């Protein structure tokens, strides 16, 4: 086990536009900043830049809000067109109370506003979550591995709220080349007892760690976590979603 | 904004016993490992070592389980004495289904088993959460600041599960010398729009980052996060608890 990890914000990544190659933007920024990608790096990439490059943007002018969206919007002083987009992105509404709309997305993520975001986008538009965050991560990974001749892992992240606790934390939506959970069950603790239910959501912790150098408004959508030992394998961010049968908070 | 952060696991911290001075254990380990504490370091300390030093340990022999605890325990093949301790530590049961007991502690934390833990403790005993994690953090901070002549922040952490997502992540229970939330509201995004609802639970992200070098079974209960700029002020981990009126998942 290595006991030092470095978190490195990647500066100089420009605003992405539809059709941009995110991996190419990252590669150029790394070269300009003279940051070497090295074997084992975990690259955490904010959903926003991925969504923009993938054209996951909706112009609100084109949205016709339903009666339900209008009703909710007028009750809570919201833009009915944004509410409509949120509802379209929702497979299931989990809570819709006191101006807060928590839903399950098509992917299965449970989050506020189905991940639809009005910040850091051009006026009159909103961004949606990437269609397939694992595929986005895989694409970025394979291009960067080819460009730098290294083996890395990629996590596509977004900031989510949580029940019971204030504030957002960065979590993993899609992953490539890293197992998102570490299962300590069966291992012994320091007293020789088997550890019982200790599964750590390592991809979420990596995303949260990376956020410390990304920072919300600072225009740093990519960070490297260097020095962390992880299980490199084909994996999916969907492993982080609790299956309905075990979910007490549906 | 600094764009490099270092996560440093502190090796060589022994198992704590009731009455131990946690700050002294940490100071000795830092000196032995030739790790210098520097201004601005955030020290993340696992709850377990704090609880043990503070004597927050219950011998199960001394516990008389109630009928309710016995019933639940026999239905789900659990130790009725552990269930009894969990119930005593719970101000309110949030969910008690399918073998999972989620409750609100006296402090207000909502977590599985009220934070009562059977791993990494001597057989026949369980640990409770520290009585006042902020006070624990404050004590450790003031002793270490005096010992090293620096200004630092301290977070007392524990791994919690979350609804909807698999796996545990490390979060902050108590803090000293650091504001646990960063409020970006009112700041502008890169398009000049005011950021609306972006409050980041920075203390939780710091705890999660630290966990990457602490690791569950590896006996590293303390880590340093170095190079992160934060607001140094009197603060409480309880700021991370959502007030009941805004909590849709009570």
Image (tube, coloured by chain):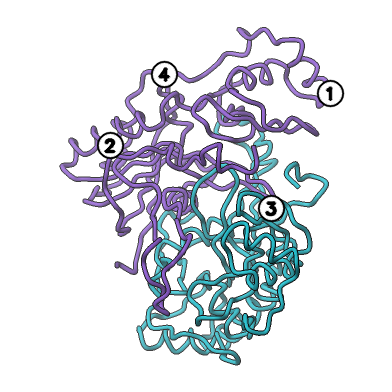
Chain colours: A purple, B cyan
Residue placed furthest toward the bottom: B19
The kind of secondary structure element at disc 1 is helix
Which residue is denoted by mark 1 in the rendering? A75
Q: Nearer the viewer, mark 4 or mark 2?
A: 2
Q: Position of residue A89 (x, y in %)?
A: 57, 21
Q: Earlier in the sequence, mark 4 or mark 2?
A: 4
Q: Do callouts 1 and 3 point to residues on the same chain?
A: no
The answer to whether residue B57 shows anywhere in this view is no
Q: In the figure, B89 relative to A185: above or below?
A: below
Provide the residue designation for mark 3.
B96
Task: Point out residue B128 in the picture as x, y percentages from the top left corner.
Answer: 64, 74
Q: Which mark is residue B37?
A: none
Q: Is residue A191 left or right of residue A234?
A: right
* SS type, badge 2: helix
* Residue where numbered disc 2 is placed: A141
Q: Chain of mark 4?
A: A
Q: Nearer the viewer, mark 2 or mark 3?
A: 3
Q: Residue at x 38, y 55 (%)?
A: A182
B221, above or below B208, in the image: below
In the image: residue A9, left or right of residue B158: left
């Amino acid at each position: 086990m290595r006991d030092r990890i470095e978190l490195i914000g990647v500066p100089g990544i420009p605003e992405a536009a539809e059709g941009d190659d995110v991996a190419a933007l990252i590669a150029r920024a790394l070269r300009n900043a003279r940051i070497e990608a090295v074997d084992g790096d975990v690259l955490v990439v904010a959903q926003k830049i991925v969504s923009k490059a993938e054209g996951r943007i909706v112009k609100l002018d084109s949205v016709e809000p339903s009666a339900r969206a209008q009703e909710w919007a007028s009750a809570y002083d919201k833009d009915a067109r944004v509410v409509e987009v949120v509802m379209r992105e929702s497979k299931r509404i989990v809570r819709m109370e006191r101006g807060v709309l928590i839903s399950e997305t098509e992917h299965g993520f449970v989050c506020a506003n189905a991940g639809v975001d009005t910040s850091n986008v051009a006026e009159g538009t909103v961004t949606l979550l990437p269609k397939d965050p694992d595929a986005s991560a895989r694409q970025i990974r394979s291009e960067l591995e080819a460009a730098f001749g290294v083996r890395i892992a990629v996590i596509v992240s977004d900031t989510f709220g949580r029940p019971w606790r204030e504030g957002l934390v960065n979590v993993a939506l899609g992953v490539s080349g890293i197992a998102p959970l570490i299962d300590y069950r069966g291992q012994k603790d320091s007293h020789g007892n088997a550890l019982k239910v200790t599964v750590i959501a390592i991809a979420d912790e990596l995303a949260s760690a990376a956020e410390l150098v990304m920072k919300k408004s600072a225009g740093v959508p990519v960070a490297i976590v260097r020095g962390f030992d992880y299980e490199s394998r084909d994996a999916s961010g969907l492993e982080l979603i609790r299956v309905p049968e075990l979910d007490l908070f549906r």
